[in-house]
């Protein structure tokens, strides 16, 4: 029997860990995996599936791909009715009976963890065991829908490493798990349903991570729901990463409240190889308590501060639409997080996922949400549709401006001209909306120009804003079309002076030590320079100033010169 496991990922660079784990656990040469993306033509993917001539096709279902999976499964059954269609994953585990009742093209649904259940299902299809013996299986029998009880959890050490030596992962994001389950009970999260935390042995983890480092994988994302729920174990894994060396970056979701001295000590020397995602969600104590989070949000903010001080790249999550969190209280949470200056801020929106407590209590909270995946909130008792719509616009601006890192200095000035950070983005949202910009795809040049036009609309000092935009443009690499408000023609007169300055080894050692030893041609390629009407390196006083930029491996450095 030929089996095809299909993963429809959000992007090409993603990899599907679930189907790889199932294939590895089953250990059959008759199992093949196929990955596509939600951006692909679904009929092309359908062709690929049919042409591979499988007897059974298993689809991995999530909120981002379930509509595409339904289309593929339905039409696959029309074209090849003899092919058995199996669905699995979080998006079908909590209403398996309803799916079998409404969607005749689905033969089986695997509920919960898939490895052991899918292996048993293969045995059942081959006649070795009965369907009743397959744990966590939903199926039809004698005109009725049956859902078997789930079986025991699969020990993670029994799941073989699921990435192959021959697979080209050079330009992919690799996903890996060192644990399953989560000890926390966040009401919006599916992981709250599975509170039994299980760990892979450190021996297995070290062996597996060594593969990624040896293959020089750029980014490995650990899918552990709370990487540091066991702080001591998390520290041991980080020691393994440090010991393995290499350039692979590891992305982990951490709970900032659990950050302690032991954990911080292990981070030293690993700053460039770690990225942490931190979900603070809100700073409204009443809301946090209602969703079973620690209402003492100051502890979480302190943890973020400590991680930032340790030099770790941070991505901080906020969720708009939680119970008891209104527009004003959420804007305060935005300010609290913004002032911490993480590398990225994700302003997300509540999704009422199947199986979660919040979905079950949606009517009680007056939460109305979209009926199709990802089941995002439309409005609630505390926040109206228009308010959520405004926050969506602000979320877009955060992504375009703050998270890109290309506008840091201009934003730093602009935010100081408002009473608080949220006010800057709220005003910018209304200005963008008035100009009809929110639904347009803008070039990098246009983003600079829009920022300049908005500052002018606010009545800010035009020459200073132009200087700041020019500084940001050069700091970000100075590539692409030059913003309209940036004048670089006059900078050419600095060329000979800059060449003379960077030829001085003593000056170079002090200003850009990373540049020492570079051949002249390579050094010159990494240099940019400009003339500014304000001294942007210190007090913004109006003073003609020259600045040299050096584009290093990790960051851009700059130094002031007299002109």
Image (cartoon, rainbow, N blue to C red):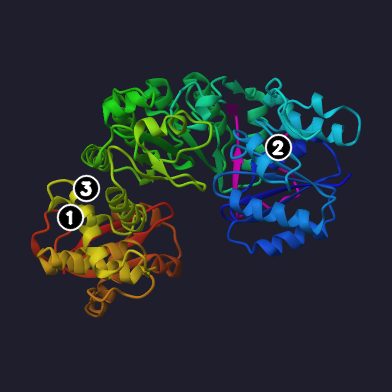
Question: Which residue: 9% across, 65% down?
Answer: 459
Location of residue 119 in the rendering, given as x and y in whole percent from the top left corner: 80, 32
Location of residue 23 in the rendering, given as x and y in whole percent from the top left corner: 76, 39
Q: Please, is residue 4 above or below residue 97 in the view?
A: below
Marks 2/3: CA distance? 45 Å
Quarter-wise, where is residue 149 in the image? top right
Q: Are the two marked residues, 1 and 3, in contact with CB atoms closer than 8 angstroms?
A: no
Marks 2/1: CA distance? 55 Å
Specify start and end residues of the magenta stretch as a single range: 160-180
162 relative to 465 in the view: left or right: right
Q: Could you tell me if residue 533 is visible in this image?
A: no
Q: Main secondary structure of the magenta part?
A: loop
Q: Please, is residue 121 above or below residue 523 in the view?
A: above
Q: Please, is residue 462 above or below residue 300 in the view?
A: below
Question: Which residue: 38% across, 21% down?
Answer: 260
Q: In terms of depth relative to the viewer, which is nearer, 116 or 100?
A: 100
Quarter-wise, where is residue 181 in the image? top right
Q: Which residue is mark 1?
A: 413
Tell me the tag on residue 422. Answer: 3
Question: Which residue: 64% across, 45% down?
Answer: 16
Q: In terms of depth relative to the viewer, which is nearer, 281 or 92?
A: 92
Marks 1/3: CA distance? 14 Å
Badge 1 local density, few (<14 within 10 Å), some, or many (20+)? some
559 relative to 345 in the view: left or right: left
Badge 3 local density, few (<14 within 10 Å), some, or many (20+)? many
């Amino acid at each position: 029997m030929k089996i095809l496991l299909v993963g429809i990922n959000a992007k090409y660079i993603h990899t599907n860990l679930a189907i790889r784990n199932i294939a590895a656990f089953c250990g059959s040469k008759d199992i093949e995996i196929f990955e596509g993306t939600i951006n692909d033509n679904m009929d092309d993917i359908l062709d690929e599936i049919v042409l591979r001539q499988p007897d059974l096709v298993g689809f991995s279902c999530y909120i981002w791909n379930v509509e595409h999976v339904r289309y593929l499964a339905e039409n696959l059954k029309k074209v090849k009715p003899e092919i058995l269609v199996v669905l699995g994953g979080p998006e079908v585990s909590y209403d398996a009976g309803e799916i079998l009742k409404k969607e005749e093209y689905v033969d089986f649904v695997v509920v919960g963890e898939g490895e052991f259940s899918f292996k048993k299902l293969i045995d059942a299809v081959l006649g070795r065991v009965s369907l009743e013996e397959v744990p966590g299986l939903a199926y039809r029998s004698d005109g009725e829908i049956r859902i078997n009880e789930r079986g025991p959890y699969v020990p993670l050490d029994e799941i073989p490493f699921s990435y192959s030596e021959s697979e080209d992962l050079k330009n992919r994001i690799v996903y890996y798990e060192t644990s399953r389950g989560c000890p926390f009970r966040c009401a919006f999260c599916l992981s709250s349903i599975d509170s039994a935390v299980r760990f892979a042995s450190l021996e297995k983890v070290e062996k597996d991570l060594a593969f990624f480092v040896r293959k020089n994988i750029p980014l490995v994302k650990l899918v552990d729901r709370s990487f540091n729920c066991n702080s001591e174990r998390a520290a041991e894994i980080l020691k393994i990463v440090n010991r393995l060396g290499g350039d692979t970056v590891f992305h982990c979701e951490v709970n900032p409240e659990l950050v302690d001295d032991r954990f911080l000590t292990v981070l030293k020397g690993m700053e460039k190889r770690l990225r942490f995602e931190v979900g603070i969600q809100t700073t409204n104590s009443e809301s946090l308590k209602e969703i079973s989070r620690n209402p003492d949000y100051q502890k979480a903010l302190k943890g973020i501060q400590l991680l930032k001080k340790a030099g770790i790249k941070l991505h901080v999550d906020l969720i708009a639409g939680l119970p008891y969190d209104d527009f004003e209280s959420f804007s305060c949470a935005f300010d609290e997080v913004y002032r911490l200056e993480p590398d990225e801020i994700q302003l997300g929106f509540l999704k009422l996922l199947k199986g979660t407590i919040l979905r079950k209590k949606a009517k009680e909270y007056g939460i109305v949400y979209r009926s199709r995946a990802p089941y995002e909130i439309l409005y609630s008792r505390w926040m109206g549709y228009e308010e959520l719509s405004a926050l969506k616009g602000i979320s877009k601006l955060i992504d375009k401006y703050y998270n890109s890192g290309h506008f840091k200095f201009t934003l730093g000035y602009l935010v100081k001209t408002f009473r608080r950070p949220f006010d800057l983005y709220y005003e910018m949202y209304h200005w963008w909306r008035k100009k009809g910009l929110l639904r347009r795809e803008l070039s990098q040049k246009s983003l600079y120009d829009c920022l300049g036009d908005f500052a002018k609309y606010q009545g800010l000092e035009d020459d200073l804003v132009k200087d700041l935009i020019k500084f940001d443009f050069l700091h970000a690499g100075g590539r692409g079309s030059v913003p309209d408000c940036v004048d670089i023609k006059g900078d050419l007169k600095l060329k000979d002076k800059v060449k003379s300055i960077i030829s001085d080894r003593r000056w170079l050692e002090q200003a850009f030590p990373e540049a020492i030893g570079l051949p002249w041609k390579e050094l010159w390629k990494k240099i940019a320079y400009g003339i500014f009407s304000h001294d942007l390196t210190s007090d913004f006083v109006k003073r003609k100033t020259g600045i040299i930029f050096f584009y290093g491996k990790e960051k851009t450095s700059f130094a002031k010169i007299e002109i």
